[in-house]
Image: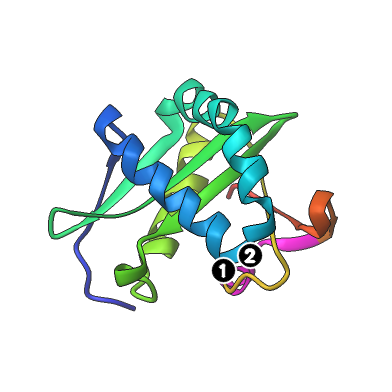
Amino acid sequence: MYDLHVTLRPAIVTDLPLIYRGELAYIQCWEPTHESAWRQHLEQNLAVWVDNFDRLTVATLEGQFAGYSLWTPDAGFAELCTISVSEVYRRKGIGRVLLKDYAVAAKHSGFTQLRLSVRADNPARLMYEQAGFVCVGTGSNAYLLYQRACG
């Protein structure tokens, strides 16, 4: 597919500012009307990142921070909370590498089902569908709910 040397590693504390900026950039681009609420709940978001730090993965390319993903256990599912690729590294397959790693890590943690939600207009939807995720309904804020087996 792509001739990239993407390295995945567990997040370290010094990655948190880059993750914060990635999440903020998403909100500002896709959900600007929710930015104020997102900022008001920043401590809660930070708590989720820290409480699930062992499920926070960073992708680097040639030693540079290229993206990250975070998943959490939720009601028997491994829930993908976020996957983000820095703008300069998009469309190079890094998101797919992070998505595959999430599925493998969830399976190794004993999960059999993956779940995520995504805006209908988010281009990442295609990546999820190509990876076998199936839309099973609509959740809060009109996000589409997707699921698939870990295997």
Q: Disc 2 versus disc 1: distance between alpha carbons?
A: 13 Å
Q: How many marks?
A: 2
Q: Quadrant of the N terminus?
A: bottom left
Q: Which residue is mark 2?
A: 132
Picture residue at 69% right of the left edge, 57% below the top: 33
Q: Quadrant of residue 113?
A: top right
Is residue 32 depicted above or below 115 in this figure? Answer: below
Is 41 part of what is drawn in magenta? no
In the picture provided, is 87 more to the left or to the right than 74? left
Residue 89 percent coordinates (x, y):
31, 69
Helix, strand or loop for disc 2: loop
Q: Which residues are magenta?
A: 124-135
- State the mark number for residue 124: 1
Q: Could you classify mark 2 by the number of other residues whose Cα lies within 10 Å: few (under 14), some (14-19), or many (20 or more)?
A: some
Left or right: 90, with 151 as reference point: left
* Mark in the foreground, 2 or 1: 1
Q: Position of residue 53 (x, y in %)?
A: 42, 27
Query: Which residue is at 33% across, 45% downward?
Result: 18
Q: Which residue, as the protein is rendered here, is positioned at the far left?
A: 62
- Taking depth in this image into account, of 27 and 113 the one nearest to the observer is 27
Looking at the picture, does residue 61 appear above or below residue 113?
below
For the residues labelled 2 and 1, say whether their Cβ atoms are less than 8 Å apart: no
Residue at image position (49%, 41%) is: 70
| Residue 6 visible in the shown view | yes
| Left/right of residue 128 with respect to residue 6 in the rendered view | right
Amino acid type indicated by mark 1: Ala
Relative to residue 112, is residue 53 depicted above or below?
A: above
